Image (spheres, helix red, strand yellow):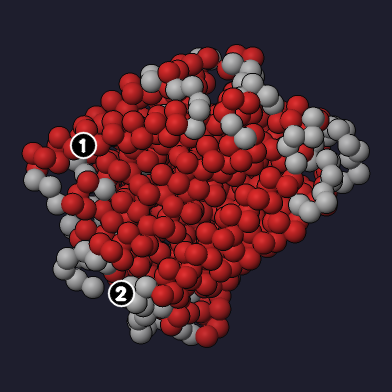
Amino acid sequence: MQGKTNQRALFTLTTVFFFWGFIAAGNSVFLGFCKEYFLLDQFQSQLIEFAFYGAYFIGALMLFIFSSIARTDIMNKWGLKNGIVYGLILSAFGAGAMIMAVTGAETGDSSAFGFVLGSLFIVGLGFSLQQTAANPFALLLGEPKTGSHRLNLAGGVNSLGTTIGPIIVTLILFGTAANANISIKEEIAAGNLTLAKVQYLYMAVGGLFLAAAALFFFFKKLPDGKADSEFHGAKKAMTSLLTITVLLVVIFFFVFIQYLGLGEGEKLSAASEMSILWLSLGGLVAIVGGLLLSNMMANKSKEGWGAMQYPQLVLGMLAIFTYVGVEVSIQSNLGALLKLPDFGEMTDSQIAPYISMYWGGLMIGRWTGAIAVFNPSNGMKKVLMVLVPYIALGVVLSLNFISGFEVKHLFVFAICVVVQIAGFFIGKDKPAPTLKIFGLLGVLAMIVGLSTTGDISIFAFLSGGLFCSIMWPSIFALSLNGLGKFTSQGSAFLVMMILGGAIIPPLQGKLGDIIGMHSSYIVCALCFAYLAFFAWIVNKKYLTAEKV
């Protein structure tokens, strides 16, 4: 579809972006609950992120394999609209599986936790289908040149979901913010926090998935998104991705067996802790090394490699992997950090506003990045670039206040927003310089956080959300530049790399178990450093004549 943006269709589409954010951020609170209820260490609790984001990779990979076997793009054959509907139904099935998984589960029941992970995996598989369909669907709803702005708008709605998610999940588990001084452990011991509340949560979530599926199915003004585009196979790329997958399965099999035979409350030996850390690093090496080796082989002979023959795409796959990894890792380990004496010794429910503010930082940036969708004049655009971030900040603070949480201590975040606004003006709405600037700001924020304690450190780490906010569309634009007929395939490969949310958080979690949670944020600093490097190297060496 060319010309004017189909706004009704776009606003309908944003509902699925909202769900992604709500569940992803809500998992950060659910993670803390599972840690206490099932008696887990930090690494084990991070398996929630491992299952959820790992499903994105498996789902996208399976779709690519089946398309290769059928010699046709299955998603295009279904239609993007139907792809979203199928994904929502699959996620609803996962919500139903969660309800059954926790039925009758007792404290410390590791088998029940395994079923919880399986249920989240199914939800993630559904999200993988939705993600694969929804991003190109947004591009169909107007002029191609404004496609990235529509993605920013959808991303802003996604971030509204991430902002609300921790608040709603906390209120469901604890009842009201008045219980903020009660820990999850105390609530479980008192019998006030049961798995019945988890069941109620997923009953509601499953119902919303089905309602959204019905909305998409019966809304006749939505385009079907079908295309008869030529399918381009990539047997060597598929073999490479399957090899990486097998290596990861083997590596994490040896990780999981380290926990076999442990009694209730029993901790791993120091040797086992180090073994898990090195195995997790091995998984990271398998991904990074496998992709770089694949590109090196493709440079010698391009046949059979498809989109993976392009260095900017492979580097972009690693960038998406790193971006999603750092975005998830900062917040999923935040709860453990804020429980430390140097960071306030907060209870689980007191942590919720901070998690909400972190995800709110992403909303602030994405709302700002979406301004161009509405085609303001240059002068008005500059005004809105200053005004919109503080409107978004006000929304985040208001949501927390209405929910009964104390927000005065969060006002200092307004200073961090100033830094982000400056980054937007310096970047001049161009993906490469904007990504480089925000990557460097992320490195600086992590260094400040690592070098300090208390509020300064907390808000430095929280500002990571501000600097992650516009990275997704920037990485996509830089990675797909110059791919021509392989653009669609390259997009699918990028979606696979949401896998970073499954690998990097557990790696940081295990490092935190060994050297301390505060020091473990060095992982996040290194991630931001790579993202800045990616923007620099791609802009310097691989962009086509019309610089992005």
Residue at x-position 57% and y-position 28%: 177
- What residue does disc 2 label? 221
Mark 2 element type: loop
* Placement of 397 over or under 124, stated as above or below: above
Q: Amino acid at mark 1?
A: Met
Q: Are marks 2 and 1 in contact (CB under 8 Å)?
A: no
Q: In this orientation, does residue 225 appear?
A: no
Image x and y of residue 88, in percent: 52, 66
Residue at x-position 48% and y-position 85%: 71
Image x and y of residue 222, in percent: 33, 73
Answer with the quarter of the image where residue 181 lies: top right
Drawn side of residue 426 relative to residue 200, left or right: left
* Placement of 2 over or under 180, stated as above or below: below
Residue at x-position 84% and y-position 41%: 108
C-alpha gap between disc 2 and disc 1: 33 Å
Drawn side of residue 283 relative to residue 39, left or right: left
Image quarter hosting the N terminus = bottom left
Between circles 2 and 1, the one closer to the viewer is 2
CA neighbours of label 1 inside 10 A, class few (<14), some (14 to 19), many (20+): many
Drawn side of residue 121 relative to residue 360, left or right: right
Drawn side of residue 80 relative to residue 502, left or right: left
Mark 1 element type: helix
Residue at x-position 74% and y-position 30%: 187
Quick one: label 2 or label 1, which is nearer the N terminus? 2
Identify the disc placed on residue 385: 1
Identify the disc placed on residue 475: none
351 and 192: which is toward the camera: 192
Image x and y of residue 527, in percent: 48, 38
493 and 174: which is toward the camera: 174
